[in-house]
Image (spheres, helix red, strand yellow):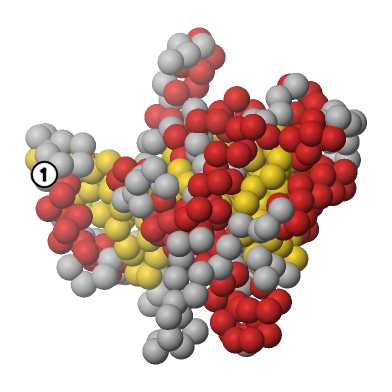
């Protein structure tokens, strides 16, 4: 506290001047000051009290009881707390929030500090300092209303929403996020946000964050499709958008995660339909050309061989014409199933057209391709077809041509070579496998 100067001390030594000074302090104090005796009769009521309560000093002093300034029972409560130890000690009440009643009958929240007045160690009344906190309460209520509205939107949102603090840990997650990720709110809160994504994304998470939050070149926020990791370890495709803002000096990132599993499943179904033969469920010619081009590039780069089998159903036209398309389709379906069963997982079967099928065998020479080709031909020749239950089962055979990719060849060259070997098998009596390389060696070409 700054010590009093000599002139100030001299000024306050005068009782009249000191009284005038104190009266000025009371009159200009921004807080309402009210003093009353033990009977509740008011003898001090400053201008700020008039502003809070609506009474002029002459209407309050000696005219009304202090208890009239509170709702029923309010004055009694204030007095009880004044003489308790709870709010500042016995005889003092500090920062006590309650309600008062204005002259017009309306109520208002106030913060009250008061003390017992004593003379010769006897209580003679009390003095109170009243601060109108209506504005603060209104602001709090608006804040709470806004928070409740936000919470309602936050919790009812169909998309998963996860907020992350600048320390990288989850600070808030809505119900949709909990359901999508499989975590309870208590598990998500405080979790490292990076754990919600597969480990392979960790290395370039900063780039993803910059792009999706719109903090990179330009200002437009981007959406990306990414996988998130559920509690069970399942990877879920989502569309990710990030929003970033500063809240009380802390950078908060809010991730909006839209589950696109259904859309991805539909896209995959449509993609498979576009590359799959609907009858045999093998891939179609279009997909063969795409995969063969990739395999040709890989073979040239790594200098490893690959081969194709051209497979044709012997005398299929006669079978189909004699027994009908339904029976013919059964043969094609059976061949598709045998192709799926008799090759490695790295090998791929295709329906090339009509009764012609192709199998692509990566990292396989024509000599190595002979083994699975013969296995398929032998096993398929033992499949029994019964167009009529009361007739003997029919057997159907295959003619297979093998061709190995040679540097400089095109896909058409490769297919043409396999086709030539397959027709050589037919011309040799059908139900056999012929290698194009063997034909070339035999002819001395």
Q: Is residue 165 above or below residue 3?
A: below
In the image, what residue occupies the spot 63% across and 71% down?
A: 278
Q: Is residue 189 left or right of residue 117?
A: right
- List x then y, in percent, for residue 399: 66, 56
Q: Is residue 1 left or right of residue 408?
A: left
Residue nearest the observer in this picture, 170 or 257: 257
Dividing the picture into quadrants, the one containing residue 441 is: top right
In the image, what residue occupies the spot 42% across and 21% down?
A: 13
In the image, what residue occupies the spot 67% across and 73% down?
A: 316
Residue nearest the observer in this picture, 101 or 310: 310
Q: Is residue 242 left or right of residue 22?
A: right
Quarter of the figure that contains the C terminus: top right
- List x then y, in percent, for residue 113: 31, 44
Residue nearest the observer in this picture, 330 or 21: 330
Residue at the disc numbered 1: 84
Look at the image and tell me whether residue 228 can be seen: no
Secondary structure found at label 1 = loop
């Amino acid at each position: 506290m700054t010590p009093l100067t000599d002139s100030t001390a001299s000024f306050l030594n005068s009782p009249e001047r000191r009284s005038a000074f104190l009266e000025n302090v009371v009159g200009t104090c921004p807080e309402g000051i009210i003093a009353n005796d033990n009977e509740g009769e008011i003898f001090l009521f400053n201008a700020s009290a008039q502003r809070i309560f609506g009474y002029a000093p002459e209407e309050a002093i000696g005219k009304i009881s202090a208890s009239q300034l509170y709702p029923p029972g309010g004055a009694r409560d204030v007095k009880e707390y004044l003489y308790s130890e709870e709010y500042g000690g016995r005889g003092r009440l500090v920062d006590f929030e309650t309600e008062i009643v204005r002259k017009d009958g309306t109520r208002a929240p106030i913060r009250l500090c008061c003390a017992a007045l004593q003379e010769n160690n006897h209580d003679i009344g009390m003095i109170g300092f009243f601060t109108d906190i209506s504005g603060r309460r209104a602001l709090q209520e608006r804040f709470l209303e806004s928070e409740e509205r936000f919470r309602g939107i936050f919790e009812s949102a169909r998309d998963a929403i996860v907020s992350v603090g600048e320390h990288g840990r989850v600070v808030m997650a809505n119900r949709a996020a909990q359901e999508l990720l499989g975590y309870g709110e208590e598990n998500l809160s405080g979790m490292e946000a990076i754990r919600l994504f597969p480990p392979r994304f960790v290395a370039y998470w900063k780039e993803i964050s910059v792009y999706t939050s719109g903090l990179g070149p330009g200002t437009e926020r981007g959406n990306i499709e990414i996988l998130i990791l559920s509690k069970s370890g399942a990877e879920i495709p989502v569309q990710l958008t990030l929003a970033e803002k500063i809240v009380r000096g802390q950078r908060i990132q809010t991730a909006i995660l839209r589950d696109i599993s259904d859309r991805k499943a539909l896209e995959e179904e449509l993609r498979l339909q576009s590359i799959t033969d609907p009858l045999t469920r093998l891939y179609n010619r279009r997909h063969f050309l795409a995969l063969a081009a990739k395999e040709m590039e890989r073979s040239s780069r790594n200098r490893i061989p690959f081969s194709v089998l051209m497979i044709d159903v012997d005398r299929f036209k006669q079978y189909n014409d004699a027994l009908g398309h339904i029976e013919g389709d059964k043969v094609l379906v059976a061949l598709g199933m045998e192709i799926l069963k008799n090759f490695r997982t790295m090998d791929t079967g295709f329906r090339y057209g009509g009764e012609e099928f192709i199998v692509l065998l990566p990292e396989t020479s024509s000599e190595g391709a002979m083994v699975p080709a013969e296995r398929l031909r032998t096993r398929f020749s033992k499949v029994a077809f019964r167009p009529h239950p009361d007739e003997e089962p029919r057997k159907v055979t295959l003619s297979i041509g093998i061709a190995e990719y040679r540097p400089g060849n095109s896909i058409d060259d490769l297919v043409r070579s396999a086709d030539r070997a397959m027709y050589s098998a037919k011309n040799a009596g059908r139900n056999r496998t012929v290698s194009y390389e063997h034909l070339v060696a035999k002819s001395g070409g």
